[in-house]
Image: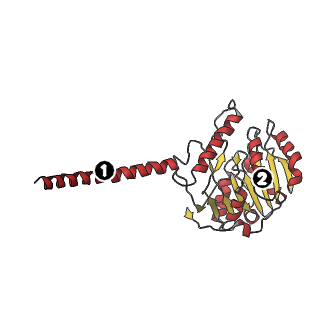
Amino acid sequence: MQPLGLDVDIDLVMQPQITIGTATINSSRYLPIFLRHLYRLDYPKKKIRLVFVDNCSEDDTITILQRFKYEHEHEYESIIIDRNTRRGNVAASHNLIVKNSITDYVVILDHDVLAMKDTLKRLIRLASTGAITHIPYLSDTERMPLRMPLRKKVSIVEECQSGCTLYKREVFDQMGYFNEEYPLTDDLEFTRRASRAGFRVVVDSRQYLIHLNPDPHRKTPSQDFIDIIREHLEVRRRLREARLYWSRYDRLKLYGYLGLLCWLPASYFLCLLSQMLSKRFLH
């Protein structure tokens, strides 16, 4: 992993037309808060095309998406709802997202990853240095920054996931689509193939996003959705407080240890000095 310096102001770059695509499958549990964050993106909505590809959902996913389209389609360039009939094949959903896009930039955002207000601008800013740009997310709420130091840097990598990833159109023009023979790891295979073909894959891990479904194999149908929101709002609060490697608590603890280390030899030296002075004055 190579570090990459980056200091480009998004305001100096023309804001391009962009497609944001999301693959859904039984996503009604996460869509309300996901769509709320998607709507709050700090980017001109008339320059955004939204593409939702549903993969044989059996809950209210389609109903929620259609309601969102009815209420907000006039604000966006367009909102497209497509269907992937190959159940469980995420690669096919990703390919439908690309086929429904007409822009030079395509962002694939997972249905359970919460975008921050500046996420789109960060991805586009990264696009000046790489053909594929990615912002990682916390996939396990137990691995908090207070316990696990974040790699606060922009790096070039060989592969990345598609949870929040921007692809330039030229990558698909040269590499083709996602390989549907890798139904669940198509993103890793595609970025690895693109990297070997000479395209730069850039990851910005200076601030992580929130993943609402940390363990897709864990069955928690009885867990209340409100509890999930509260839990991850707490995660976001802790992330906001941990923008540096060390939290305030960690810094205070470090200062305490340093003070103790300095105080021990200093107290020992003062004891020796007092003994020497007492002997001198007594004699």
Q: Position of residue 129 (x, y in %)?
A: 66, 68
Q: Report the residue at 55% width, 55% height from top.
A: 244
Q: Secondary structure at mark 2?
A: strand
Q: Residues within 10 Å of mark 1 (few under 14, many from 20)?
A: few
Amino acid type shown at disc 1: Leu
Where 255 falls versus 5 (above or below)? above
Sequence-first disc among 2 and 1: 2
Coloration of the structure image: secondary structure
C-alpha span from label 2 to label 1: 60 Å
Looking at the image, residue 151 sits to the left or right of residue 37; the answer is left
Amino acid type shown at disc 2: Gly
Where's the N terminus, which quadrant?
bottom right
Q: Report the residue at 69% width, 64% height from top.
A: 125
Looking at the image, residue 264 sits to the left or right of residue 91; the answer is left
* Displayed quadrant of residue 101: bottom right
Q: Mark 1 highlights which residue?
A: 264
Q: Position of residue 57 (x, y in %)?
A: 79, 39
The one of 158 and 129 positioned closer to us in this rendering:
129
Residue furthest left in the image:
283
Residue furthest front in the image:
281
Q: Mark 2 highlights which residue?
A: 21
Q: Residues within 10 Å of mark 2 (few under 14, many from 20)?
A: many
Q: Secondary structure at mark 1?
A: helix
